[in-house]
Image (spheres, rainbow, N blue to C red):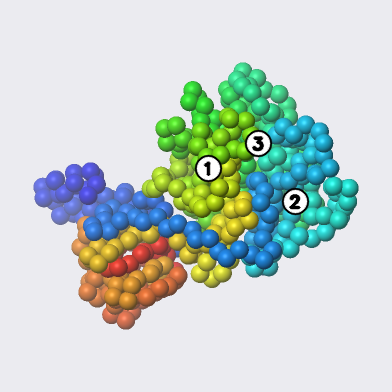
Amino acid sequence: MSRIYRTFTRYRTSLPAVALVTLTATVAWSQTIDIGSRRELFVDRLLIDTMDDAELRLHHPVKAPRAASPLPERHYFTVIKDGDLYRAYWRGTDPSYSGETHTGHAGETIYYAESHDGHEWEFPKLGLHEVGGTRDNNVILAKQPPFLTNFTPFLDVRPGVKPAERYKALAGYPGPGDKRGKSEPGWGLFAFVSADGIHWTKRNEVIPYRPKWRHAFDSQNVSFWSEAEQQYVCYFRTWTSPERLRSISRTTSPDFESWTTPVAMNPNLPGEHLYTNQTHPYFRAPHIYIATPTRFVPGRGNAPNYDAKDVNATDILLMTSRAGSTKYDRPFTEAFIRPGLGAARWRNRSNYVALNVIPTGPTEMSIYHRSGDRYILRTDGFISVHSGTVEGELITKPLSFSGQELSLNFSTSAAGGIQVEIQKPDSTPIPGFSATDCLPVYGDEIDGTVRWRGNSDLSTLAKQPVRLKFVMTECDLYSLRFE
């Protein structure tokens, strides 16, 4: 129970009836979270007030069968779903290049592939650039140092976006070394635009390098149009000081040209390096941003053909943030995807996943690994509220909603189930919507409707502050939405 509510209950007996009604309404609304008709996932504790014999459970992606024509093993992938077409982008190197091989060198290239099912990939021969002595290839960008080291595109879903700028990207690399107190034009991130995601035009430098930074921008710097914030958002690589940990900062823009002063998000645990961030709006709930960063652990693993300083192990984490927030939520700090079996996965920088979690079926979403493997999860299936054979309860904070029906993403055993009680903010059951009025919900559904005495219509409760109480047995509850 919150401090505000405890204070209210302590003094309410001394209040006149009219004042009591007014104060009750004021307290209820001051604590109410308006979720409208948005889908809410249990990837953080925003809606959770109490849990009894229930817990949050992290669900680990499962490797799908290897495709006959998979994506190659390369660095810094992005996968975008554009209607029925999947587009993949990654960094490669011109095999005929013989110059310096430092990061940002002139031989770096950007390759492109596409798919109609998100599993098997095609590599079109585009003829745009001569690479390896031929134009018979799928290279879309070449000979633009240092921008191709971390070129990271996105599909711009902003209403009214110019057709010629339907795709955008940020790219740039300032070079190695400590740059504190220094800043030069060209060290920052530059904008790229495209009508079709294949033919690109470089624009101006839009996010400049800041003299207070030791180092920045030296991994994928991701950006997107936020429907929830109504502005562009960029999450990019910075380093903490004085610890010198690879970390993440955030900046925003109304037009993809002028960007706000960056804010350090500092999601690192002590001593923890976050090599990439891969932050993006979740496709079923775009006000929630999913992040699948690579955790970099120096001094472990194997690094054949590299210097001793490059001995490291890597794995993938799961974090989330919400529209407008400058913090990440991390209910689980353990690995989301482990390196796994095989010595190759324990070598230098071997574990990255592509930017974006992508729907690849009505009940499935995919995460693409730099190995060419595809990992799958149930739709919304990052984290669940879990109960076992002992009946568990979840009670939400006061919330208000828009819509007529409550839809749940859930999975139960044959013996398990859920019943939902709708309560007033003081935890009193609303007549007709108690747990005993609720028909048991069981099975396995992505969008299952809840009914009370055979009735699913909640329109009389819309816009009012309520609590939801879930009574659960052998169940995983992934998300909810009022529709």
* Distance from the alpha carbon under mark 2 to that under mark 1: 24 Å
Classify mark 2: helix, strand or loop.
strand
Question: x, y percentage for residue 426?
Answer: 21, 57
Comparing 395 with 81, the one in front is: 81
Q: Distance of mark 3 from mark 1, alpha carbons?
A: 18 Å
Residue drawn at (59%, 53%) of the image: 369
Residue 202, label in figure: none
Q: Position of residue 405 (x, y in %)?
A: 40, 72
Residue identifier under label 1 = 314
Q: What residue type is disc 3 on?
A: Asn
The answer to whether 294 is drawn above or below residue 159 in the figure is above
Q: Quadrant of residue 120?
A: bottom right
Q: Circle 3 sits on which residue?
A: 305
74 lies left or right of 417 = right
Q: Which residue is mark 2?
A: 111
Amino acid, disc 2: Tyr
- Taking the spot 42% from the left edge, 58% from the top edge, the residue there is 59
Give the amino acid at mark 1. Thr
Residue 342 vs residue 202, the one in the foreground: 342
Q: Residue at x 48, y 47 (%)?
A: 317
Q: Badge 1: few (under 14), some or many (20 or more) residues near its Cα, within 10 Å?
A: many
Q: Are marks 2 and 3 in contact (CB under 8 Å)?
A: no
Q: Is residue 9 visible from the viewing direction of this image? A: yes
Q: Nearer the viewer, mark 2 or mark 3?
A: 3
Direction from residue 477 to residue 86 in the image, left or right: right
Query: Residue at horizontal 42%, vertical 65%?
Result: 481
Crowdedness near tag 3: few (<14), some (14–19) or many (≥20) residues, C-alpha within 10 Å: few
Frontmost of labels 2 and 1 is 1
Residue occupying the far left of the picture:
14
Is residue 194 shown left or right of residue 340?
Answer: right
